[in-house]
Structure formats: C-alpha cells, structure tokens
Image (tube, helix red, strand yellow):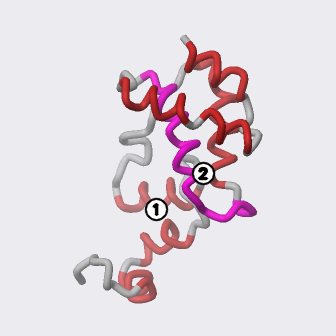
Amino acid sequence: MALTTRAERQAIRDAFPLYREIIDAPRFSWGIPAYRTACQNLGIDPDDGRPEYRREDVALVEALENWIIDPVRPFSADQINVGQVLEFIRIDRQPSPMLHDQVRRQLPLYRRINLPFLTEIERRVAA
C-alpha cells in the first residue's frame, strides 16, 4: 500500500496493527507507552533521534511538551511555535540564528498564551 495523502486512515490502521497504536495516540510524545511498545515490537529504537536537553531543564521540557500535547487544546500553529522553544534549548545540536530569531519574534505569543517558564525562555532568548 502506498502511503500517500490519498491513503485511507482506516486502511492503514487495518494493514499495520503495530502502527495502529501510534496512529491512534491523540498527540505524539517520546514517552507514550503505545509509541515505545510499537517501536520495540518493530525492532526500532524508540529513542533514535530523541532530542537531548540539559539535566536542569527537565521541568521546563516536561511543561512545554505537556502544553503541546494537551488533549484539551485543539491543535494549531501555537503548538508548532512552542515546539520551536524545545528545538532552541536542545543540547544535541546548536540552534541556528534563524531559530533564535523565530523564538524571539514569538515572545508576544508566548506571553499571550501564558506559556510556562516564560521568564526563563525570555532570559535565554536575550542571552
């Protein structure tokens, strides 16, 4: 079955039972049991490509990830913009100047949506 934009979601679910668990997850997170179990069943390392953060950023990262995947919040561009903060604070790769500028320009949005750890995010953008 070709996986194209025309592929039927139900047909994919029926054809790939192990993948079904991932498709049915309300939002993606590296830690959701369905994702981790499906990867292990498929022989895929569930942490391959997983972003790395400073140990002291655990609470910040968890708060931002939870904000993004909150099932009460309808998906919108806000989640993508908050995801840029996570990209910005990664330690496994250097953020580009363009990413730094994008996060800086989104500060008014982060204030409007009352993003957790906003003071820390503003401090890092100013550094």
Segment colored magenta: 71-91
Is 32 placed left or right of 23 in the picture? Answer: right
Does the CB distance between marks 1 and 2 fall below 8 Å?
no
Residue 97, horizontal then vertical, whole percent: 37, 24
Q: Is residue 120 magenta?
A: no
Q: Is residue 79 magenta?
A: yes
Q: Nearer the viewer, residue 73 or 104?
A: 104
The residue that mark 2 highlights is 78
Is 67 placed left or right of 44 in the picture? Answer: right
Residue 57, horizontal then vertical, whole percent: 63, 23
How packed is label 1: few (under 14 Cα within 10 Å), some, or many (20 or more)?
Answer: some
Looking at the image, is mark 1 or mark 2 nearer the viewer?
2
Label 1 sits on a secondary structure element that is helix
Point 45% across, 87% down: residue:
10
Q: Which mark is residue 24?
A: none
* Quadrant position of the N terminus in the picture: bottom left
Point 71% across, 28% down: residue:
118
Is 2 placed left or right of 31 in the picture? Answer: left
Point 75% across, 63% down: residue:
72
Label 2 sits on a secondary structure element that is helix
| Residue most extreme to the left | 2
The residue that mark 1 highlights is 38
Please, what is the three-letter code of the amino acid marked with disc 1? Ala
Tell how many labels.
2
Please, what is the three-letter code of the amino acid marked with disc 2? Asp
Residue 124, horizontal then vertical, whole percent: 58, 17
Q: Nearer the viewer, residue 24 or 33?
A: 24
